[in-house]
Image (cartoon, rainbow, N blue to C red):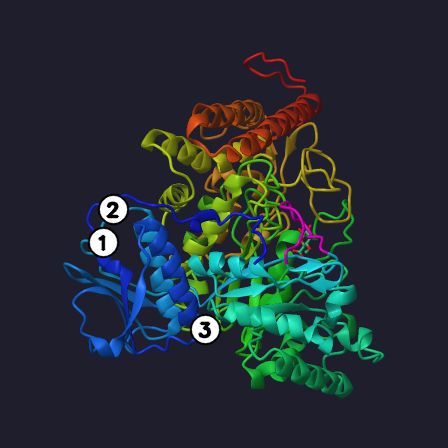
């Protein structure tokens, strides 16, 4: 076996002091499931490893017939057809027995990871009595990995799926699958949504063997492999003159191609499609609408049980900055909501949040609650493209939680984003949540060691949207590090304050952008201002912000009431989104009593100061941290501090110069 050059993150099981003698867990009795099933095999080896390390004693599997399934000692794994597909039940059935029941092998796997988590966290097993099933049917990672090994917006090294035009399948593939299965992820797209070059050929026979192997490893952990698809494949691979989704020869081409792909990779879950977006081809090219494009593919792959996940990130990326009516925030809704009810059952619309593009603060996309008869999925991004790029600390779970709990008022109850994407609102099954992943081949997977909390947190939250950011962070911290309660509190403080800190020193009150256009890191207040991407802050000597009210672009009116009115009025618009929805004069007083300009100055100075506090807290726990982790994170915190300084200086001096208004506190603005 090759030497592992990567860590095991939260699965680095360590000997744990449990409050009672749990050695009975080393006897495993399997009932109703076959030891030979790949998922069960993997479950048993995880138990071997996990229990072995945590309790310090190797477990052994006892055949069920020896005890007729009625063992009063051990970990009894048993089939219970009543339980939901991916759910499980963990119950303390006696002094020396715990029962894990599930209706499927996947349920057993998830229940096992839950048990191991409880053991790692030294939680009481006195009466676990847990009965749970995932809220979201699809819990997905989207990797933007290219086949040359680079990763679009990747900040953790290179791809561990591809290198030099080839697919990599090795020990790391398995560890990756274990890691993400342990947090409940059940679907993965391995290649970039921008599909070009060799990636277009992933649906041909060329990569059949490694893809099948990978999909089998994934399937052993309950994960379905998905691919991103090039809508122009009929032209690029099939030499057809067009890829018009209504052209019979195009449809025929897809039918044949899809037969090949599903023959080659029977476990394939389906495809993620970025069409008519940022230069990628799509149905619009042929005067067809998005539903016609998506449904064509959906019909072709329906016989194989495949899903088409169709992104709604469709907008005009060739705008003129003088044009004040075209509004990029509107585009998703404008391009899709009228087609409500027209998408096939195996199509899911994947809606990026926010409506602009993964900024530190945006309102929730009005497509949630804007469509009643369409499968929807939420797309977030833990890759931190605009939120610090895994250099600056930014624990994103609080942001995701806000999105999920947003009330859309599409119904009187069960109307939050969480309700919609879990399928509760409309009773649909093809729904869920996806994130752009933050992993790469760095030894610690996520570049910034603390950014692993976002990966962990995404999975846990996707499973159970009631978990709080704090609960998740605590779980992650204590499974990852061995810390005293005080030290753990410091890490928790760092995670829980990081989003606010990042927001404070970057773009204010929901306006977004102000980043360097080349790489999206660091400040450039006007970097995007006169460009064609539709990303404007509209600052002049009097004020800043975009009027998205009924008198402006009308974006606020895309929401259901009372949200539409709430956003439309600067008095009721949540202040953190004020500049997203309104143009505000610098001397306007905010709820705090401060003027807008003073708020901008203060929050930037504060953000910079708090970035320094992050470092102080980290330094204070140096002795308790692993030798390699401490300096690695410290180095990033130093970079974050200089970034924060740069942001603070540039944003404050920009607004000082343009407004001519002095800082009330008389600080020097550089
Ligand atoms: O924000 C933009 C990114 C692109 C990305 C695009 C998308 C994959 O800058 O790199 O392309 O979003 O989400 O499709």
Q: Secondary structure at mark 2?
A: loop
Helix, strand or loop for the magenta stretch, by majority:
loop
Q: Residue at x 57, y 52 (%)?
A: 3
The residue at which mark 3 appears reads as: 38
Q: How far apart are the two marked residues, 1 and 2, measured between alpha carbons?
A: 8 Å
The residue furthest left is: 95
Q: Nearer the viewer, residue 50 or 408?
A: 50
Q: How far apart are the two marked residues, 2 and 3, measured between alpha carbons?
A: 30 Å
The response on whether ligand 1 sits within 8 Å of label 3 is no
Is residue 134 visible in the rendered structure shown here?
Answer: no
The x and y percentages for residue 23 are 24, 55
Q: Nearer the viewer, residue 212 or 350?
A: 212
Q: Residue at x 43, y 58 (%)?
A: 182
The residue at which mark 1 appears reads as: 22
Q: Is residue 197 magenta?
A: no
**Image quadrant in which the C terminus is located:** top right
């Amino acid at each position: 076996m090759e030497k592992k050059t990567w860590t095991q993150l939260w699965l680095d099981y360590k000997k744990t002091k449990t409050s009672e003698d749990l050695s009975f867990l080393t006897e495993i009795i399997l009932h109703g499931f076959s030891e030979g099933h790949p998922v069960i095999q993997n479950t048993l080896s995880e138990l071997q490893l996990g229990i072995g390390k945590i309790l310090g004693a190797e477990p052994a599997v006892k055949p069920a017939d020896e005890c007729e399934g009625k063992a009063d000692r051990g970990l009894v794994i048993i089939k219970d057809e009543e339980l939901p597909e991916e759910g499980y039940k963990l119950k303390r059935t006696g002094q020396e027995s715990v029962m894990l029941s599930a209706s499927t092998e996947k349920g057993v796997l998830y229940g096992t990871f839950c048990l191991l988590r409880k053991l790692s966290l030294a939680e009481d097993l006195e009466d676990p009595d847990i009965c749970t099933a995932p809220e979201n049917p699809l819990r997905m990672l989207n990797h933007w990995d290219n086949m040359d090994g680079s990763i679009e917006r990747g900040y953790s090294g290179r791809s561990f799926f591809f290198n030099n035009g080839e697919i990599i399948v090795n020990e790391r593939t398995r560890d990756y699958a274990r890691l993400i299965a342990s947090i409940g992820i059940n679907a993965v797209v391995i290649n970039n949504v921008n599909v070009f070059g060799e990636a277009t050929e992933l649906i041909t026979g060329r990569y059949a063997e490694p893809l099948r192997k990978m999909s089998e490893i994934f399937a052993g952990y309950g994960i379905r492999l998905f691919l991103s698809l090039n809508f122009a494949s009929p032209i690029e691979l099939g030499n057809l003159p067009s890829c018009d989704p209504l052209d019979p020869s195009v449809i025929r081409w897809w039918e044949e191609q899809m037969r090949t792909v599903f023959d080659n990779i029977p476990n394939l879950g389906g495809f993620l499609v970025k069409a008519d977006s940022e230069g990628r081809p799509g149905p619009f090219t042929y005067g067809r609408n998005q539903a016609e494009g998506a449904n064509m593919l959906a019909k072709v792959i329906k016989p194989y049980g495949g899903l088409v996940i169709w992104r709604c990130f469709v907008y005009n990326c060739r705008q003129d900055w003088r044009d004040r009516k075209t509004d990029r925030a509107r585009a998703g809704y404008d391009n899709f909501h009228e087609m409500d009810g027209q998408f096939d059952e195996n199509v899911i619309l994947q809606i990026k949040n926010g409506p602009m593009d993964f900024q530190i603060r945006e309102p929730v996309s009005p497509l949630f609650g804007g469509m009643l008869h369409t499968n929807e999925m939420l797309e977030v991004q833990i890759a931190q493209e605009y939120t610090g790029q895994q250099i600056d600390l930014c624990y994103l779970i609080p942001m995701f939680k806000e999105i999920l709990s947003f009330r859309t008022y599409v119904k009187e109850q069960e109307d939050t984003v969480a309700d919609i994407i879990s399928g509760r609102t409309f009773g649909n099954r093809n729904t869920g949540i996806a994130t752009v992943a933050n992993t790469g081949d760095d030894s610690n997977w996520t570049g910034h060691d603390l950014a692993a909390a976002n990966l962990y947190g995404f999975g846990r939250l996707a499973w159970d949207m009631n978990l709080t950011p704090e609960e998740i962070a605590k779980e992650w911290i204590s499974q990852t590090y061995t810390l005293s309660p005080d030290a753990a509190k410091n890490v928790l403080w760092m995670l829980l304050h990081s989003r606010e800190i990042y927001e404070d020193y970057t773009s204010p009150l929901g306006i977004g952008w102000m980043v360097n256009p080349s790489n999206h890191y660091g400040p450039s207040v006007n970097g995007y201002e006169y460009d064609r991407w539709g990303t404007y802050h509209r600052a002049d000597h009097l004020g800043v912000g975009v009027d998205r009210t009924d008198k402006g672009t009308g974006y606020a009116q895309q929401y259901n009431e009372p949200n539409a009115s709430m956003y439309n009025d600067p008095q009721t618009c949540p202040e953190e989104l004020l500049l997203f929805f309104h143009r505000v004069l610098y001397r306007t007083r905010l709820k705090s009593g401060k003027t807008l300009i003073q708020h901008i100055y203060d929050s930037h100075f504060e953000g910079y100061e708090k970035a320094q506090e992050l470092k102080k807290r980290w330094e204070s726990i140096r002795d308790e941290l692993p030798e390699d982790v401490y300096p690695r994170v410290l180095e990033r915190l130093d970079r974050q501090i200089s970034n924060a300084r740069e942001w603070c200086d540039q944003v404050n001096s920009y607004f000082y110069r343009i407004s001519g208004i002095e800082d009330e506190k008389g600080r020097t603005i550089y």
